[in-house]
Image (cartoon, rainbow, N blue to C red):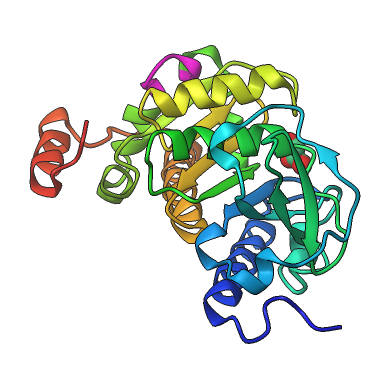
């Protein structure tokens, strides 16, 4: 069967990036079974021929009305699909969907009728929010990074910016490459409307990476690779913290002065 990616190098490159990141999530042990989701707004890569493609699924309700998504196209990981399978076969473990003109429903258009992720309403709500704000961010990644999730099992790290300051102070790159830090959302039921709403509220509070207590992270950025990088630098910092603790001491962390110097030199927002 002909893939919609054929003879469309820019679109193919976007989907290849998703597959590459899916492989990293699996290798890092962050994507057990069907854990995690990725959605990418690919509207800018969609030509008239794709716009004319017929639906290959019935019309599904999104579960929310999202006015900024009218006529948008997304690549979405499939529900119940594994990241490790998506890494090798992205168009069999994910699909491309078109948002219909009512802004409340969608159809699958390519390559296979793979039903999107169970977290679709919250992912699409976030994309709707990003477009409404005029943000250049087009990708969202949800995954289960072991050390970051472990940190949320104590109330201390759930307080605003406590974990952020600690992680930033472990290694200078963390603040440089995750300059807005880690926003915290108290435990909520996976896939729930409330979790989606709290995630948007936290992104609106100027975070790119949102921690879901005892569950995982949700990151947004310009593309899937950049969203992954932010999670990766944060989790690396968490690993350094835990390594120091395992050696039997509380790590000193960089000083406030060293952190200030870093912010000035790199022109960081916080
Ligand atoms: O889709 O990780 O939170 C699998 C999940 C849901
Ligand atoms: Zn999850």
Is 197 or 226 nearer to us in this picture? 197
Residue at the limit of the structure toward the right, as seen here: 58
Residue 8 locus on image (x, y percent): 59, 81
Question: Which quarter shows the N terminus?
Answer: bottom right
Is 116 or 151 nearer to us in this picture? 116
Residue 175 locus on image (x, y percent): 28, 42
Q: Residue at x 13, y 44 (%)?
A: 267
Can residue 213 be seen? no
Is 250 or 205 nearer to us in this picture? 205
Does 204 sit left or right of 125 as displayed? left
Establish if 63 lies above or below 208.
Answer: above
Residue 244 locus on image (x, y percent): 42, 40
Quarter of image, res 21? bottom right
Establish if 49 lies above or below 155.
Answer: below
Quarter of image, res 56? bottom right
Question: Which quarter shows the C terminus?
Answer: top left
Q: Magenta segment: does it hold 11? A: no
Can residue 1 be seen? yes
Does 97 sit left or right of 7 as displayed? right
Q: Residue at x 41, y 44 (%)?
A: 237
Q: Residue at x 68, y 84 (%)?
A: 6
Q: Which residues are magenta?
A: 157-162
Quarter of image, res 199? top right
Does 245 sit left or right of 76 as displayed? left
Q: Residue at x 72, y 33 (%)?
A: 104
Residue 142 locus on image (x, y percent): 62, 43
Q: How many marks?
A: 0
């Amino acid at each position: 069967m002909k893939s919609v990616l054929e003879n469309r190098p820019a679109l193919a490159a976007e989907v290849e990036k998703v597959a590459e990141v899916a492989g990293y999530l699996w290798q890092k042990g962050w994507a057990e079974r069907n854990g995690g989701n990725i959605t990418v707004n690919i509207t800018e890569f969609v030509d008239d021929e794709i716009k004319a493609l017929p639906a290959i699924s019935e019309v599904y309700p999104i579960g929310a009305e999202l006015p900024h998504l009218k006529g948008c196209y997304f690549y979405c990981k499939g529900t119940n699909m594994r990241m490790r399978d998506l890494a090798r076969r992205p168009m069999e473990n994910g699909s491309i969907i078109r948002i219909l003109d009512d802004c409340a429903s969608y159809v699958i258009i390519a390559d296979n009728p793979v039903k999107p992720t169970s977290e679709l309403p919250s992912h699409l709500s976030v994309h709707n929010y990003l477009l409404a704000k005029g943000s250049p961010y087009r990708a969202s990644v949800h995954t289960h990074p072991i050390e970051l999730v472990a940190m949320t099992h104590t109330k201390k790290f759930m307080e605003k910016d406590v974990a952020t300051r600690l992680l930033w102070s472990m290694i200078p790159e963390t603040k440089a490459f995750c300059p807005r830090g880690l926003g915290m959302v108290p435990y909520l039921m996976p896939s729930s409307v409330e979790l989606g709403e709290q995630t948007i509220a936290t992104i609106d509070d100027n975070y790119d990476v949102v921690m879901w207590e005892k569950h995982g992270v949700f990151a947004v950025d310009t593309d899937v690779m950049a969203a992954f990088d932010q999670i990766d630098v944060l989790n690396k910092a968490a690993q350094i913290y835990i390594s120091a603790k395992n050696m039997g001491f509380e790590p000193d962390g960089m000083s406030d002065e060293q952190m200030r110097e870093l912010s000035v030199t790199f022109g960081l927002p916080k």
